[in-house]
Image: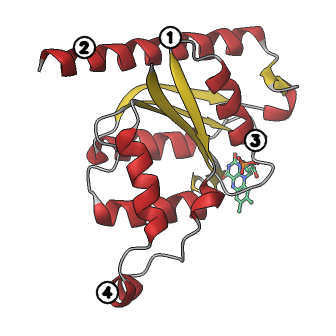
Amino acid sequence: MKNIIAFAGSNSKNSINKELVTYASSLITEANVTILDINDFGLPIYGIDLENSQGIPDNAHRFLEAIKKSDGILLSLAEHNGAYSTAFKNLFDWMSRIEGKTFYGKPMLLMATAPGGRGGASVLEIAKNRFPYHDAEIVDVFSLPFFGKNFENGKITDKELDEKLKTSIGKFEKAVSEADLSKEVA
Ligand SMILES: Cc1cc2nc3c(=O)[nH]c(=O)nc-3n(C[C@H](O)[C@H](O)[C@H](O)COP(=O)(O)O)c2cc1C
């Protein structure tokens, strides 16, 4: 059984992105999924002076190790002022100082949700353009707009959007298994 990690790019205890990524995880049938919470990997705000004086904190190493050991990544990003949340960007910045190829070529399903109608479109655009420079293998991108209207009791209520996510999950699971096959051949 392969191992997938799932997490939200948010440090909110009531993160709607965590709710979405948890639902997406429940749709995975062919792998174990570990849901991570970035609150369990607390980090000081990145700064070059801090890095030079104290080095890179263990929690950045721990999170990066979880990515490295995984066979795929489900990630749902919160959007703050059209970009990553500070908490996610901070984790990303610290990890990128250890390893520029931060996502190790792992298949990734990139998601976002927001209370509004754009469903995190701006942060998705940023991540879609940037993550490949960090060796992310983005298999598909899924956005859930109007979270309050389209999500209830742990599930997407809009049939069309739910089908869309299920199609994305199917592509993601296929990529995870094909990545495996190519490793076996190599
Ligand atoms: C500082 C701040 C900036 C925000 N900026 C945006 C934004 O640019 N676009 C958007 O759709 N929602 C924005 N929101 C609303 C968030 O989408 C909303 O708080 C959402 O719950 C964040 O996801 P999370 O619950 O997973 O943390 C912002 C919220 C905060 C606190």
Packing grade of label 2 (10 A; few <14, some 14-19, many >=20) is few
Tell me the kind of residue under disc 1.
Answer: Gly
**Residue at label 4?**
52
Tag in front: 4 or 2:
2
C-alpha distance separating marks 1 and 3 = 22 Å
Place of residue 186 in the rendered image (x, y in percent of width and height, measured from the top left): 11, 21
Residue at figure coordinates x 28%, y 36% from the top left = 105
Determine whether label 4 and label 3 are within 8 Å by CB: no
Tell me the kind of residue under disc 2.
Answer: Leu
Place of residue 156 in the rendered image (x, y in percent of width and height, measured from the top left): 77, 20
Q: Is mark 4 within 8 Å of ligand 1?
A: no
Residue at figure coordinates x 50%, y 10% from the top left = 170
Q: Does residue 114 appear anywhere in the picture?
A: no
**Residue at label 2?**
181
Disc 1 is placed on an element classified as: helix
Work out whether mark 1 precedes mark 3 in sequence or the reverse, and give the earlier one: 3
C-alpha distance separating marks 2 and 3 = 34 Å
The quarter of the picture where residue 58 lies is bottom left
Tell me the kind of residue under disc 4.
Answer: Asn
Residue at figure coordinates x 67%, y 36% from the top left = 118
Disc 4 is placed on an element classified as: helix
Place of residue 126 in the rendered image (x, y in percent of width and height, measured from the top left): 45, 47
Q: Is mark 3 within 8 Å of ligand 1?
A: yes
**Residue at label 3?**
16
C-alpha distance separating marks 1 and 2 = 17 Å
Determine whether label 4 and label 2 are within 8 Å by CB: no
**Residue at label 1?**
170
Tag in front: 4 or 3:
4
Disc 3 is placed on an element classified as: helix
Tell me the kind of residue under disc 3.
Answer: Ile
